[in-house]
């Protein structure tokens, strides 16, 4: 049909629709919003996207994504405090930072070990993590992997790989989330919280 | 905090979060997706957004948005069939086109009459609509405005403005939507459908 939103606009809607959290309908609404507010919304978004596309890069130390070759966490000498937090993904690093409370550095695996997808320790930068232990005087490796089978398998592997290096390996506590109501929690979480119960 | 997603990336998340249908959380997920898939997703999106920002413009005849000064509907001589469909917004025009069935041209008001916001007939291009009646040999003006108070007020005004020009003015039927279940419909719709009941 010649009379549907044409060419470039339709292409942009299709690209937006592939972003997580958007579908064809919401992508169309978003693009229409851009078209209606060109100076106020579309132009700033275009400039911002261009800046990120040109500037964003993986931190050469930890794998975080930022605007500089060394991310702000690794660039801050106060954060070399002997603790490294291992996360699967940059999203998890950001979530940890939002939560606050961790004052050390990170190591982003970029995934989990997977026989099926042929993801081995090298792909996750585990040899590089071992190098960092001595170089940065690490005393504790905190595993903040997702509470999935893949996350647990990977955590187990890393714990074994750390063993010869004399660092303490810890993991995030499992239990009832803040504000969590027992009635709405899955059985696994309740069982884990019970097993890890502590004296008040 | 120096250690949150920094500078340019945070700015991009903030801009994305302001798009309709996205919030801070989904904007962050979308931007992370872009950062992870730079070649496959971010670069095509940047190119596409640039093309749209440079190319998209309002059709000088009907107010549709397209990549050319005259939109594909107005550029197609077969669509000068004596019918003009008046819509509030480009989104409504696109919805009409997706629905199919209408083979005439459009007139996009860009809003509704509003005393409060000082939106008068000139702001909605109603004088231009009157000019088009003769220029394009219009016989019927179909009002496809939203079923809101503002839409109804504007429809009433346009119907009066068309009266001296000898065109027939119609409006979309109101009633039960396709697949609509009475139990889930609002009372107003049911009452309107009852009042407009027709013989089987």
Image (cartoon, coloured by chain):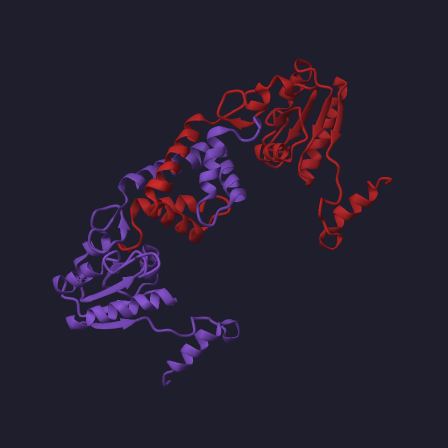
Chain colours: A purple, B red
- The residue lying at 27 percent from left, 59 percent from top is A120
Residue A101 horizontal/vertical position (percent): 29, 66
In this view, the residue farthest toward the bottom is A199
Q: Residue furthest right?
A: B199
Left or right: residue B177 versus residue A199 is: right
x, y percentage for residue B114?
A: 63, 35
Tell me where residue B200 appears, x and y as whole percent.
86, 41
The part of the image, by quadrant, that contains residue A51 is top left
Is A56 on the left-hand or right-hand side of A127?
right
B134 w.r.t. B28: above or below: above
Q: Residue at x 19, y 56 (%)?
A: A76
- Identify whether B183 is placed above or below A199: above
Q: Is residue B84 above or below residue A118?
A: above
Tell me: B44 left or right of B72.
left
Q: Quadrant of the N terminus of chain A?
A: top right
Left or right, B132 with reference to A36 = right
Q: Nearer the viewer, residue A172 or A120?
A: A120
Q: Tell me what residue is drawn at x 79 percent, y 44 percent.
A: B193
């Amino acid at each position: 049909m010649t009379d549907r939103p044409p060419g470039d606009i339709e292409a942009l809607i299709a690209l937006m629709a592939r972003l997580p959290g958007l579908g064809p309908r919401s992508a169309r609404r978003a693009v229409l919003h851009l078209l209606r507010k060109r100076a106020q919304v579309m132009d700033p978004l275009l400039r911002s996207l261009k800046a990120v596309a040109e500037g964003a890069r993986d931190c050469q130390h930890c794998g975080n994504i930022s605007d500089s070759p060394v991310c702000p966490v690794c660039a801050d000498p106060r954060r070399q405090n002997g603790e490294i937090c291992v996360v699967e993904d940059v999203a998890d690093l950001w979530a940890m930072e939002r939560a606050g409370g961790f004052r050390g550095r990170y190591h982003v695996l970029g995934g989990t070990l997977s026989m099926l997808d042929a993801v081995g320790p090298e792909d996750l930068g585990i040899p590089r993590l071992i190098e960092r232990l001595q170089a940065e005087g690490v005393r504790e490796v905190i595993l903040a992997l997702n509470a999935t089978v893949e996350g647990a398998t990977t955590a187990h592997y890393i714990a074994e790989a750390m063993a010869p290096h004399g660092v303490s390996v810890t993991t995030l506590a499992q239990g009832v989330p803040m504000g969590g109501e027992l009635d709405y929690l899955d059985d696994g979480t309740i069982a884990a919280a019970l097993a890890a119960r502590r004296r008040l």
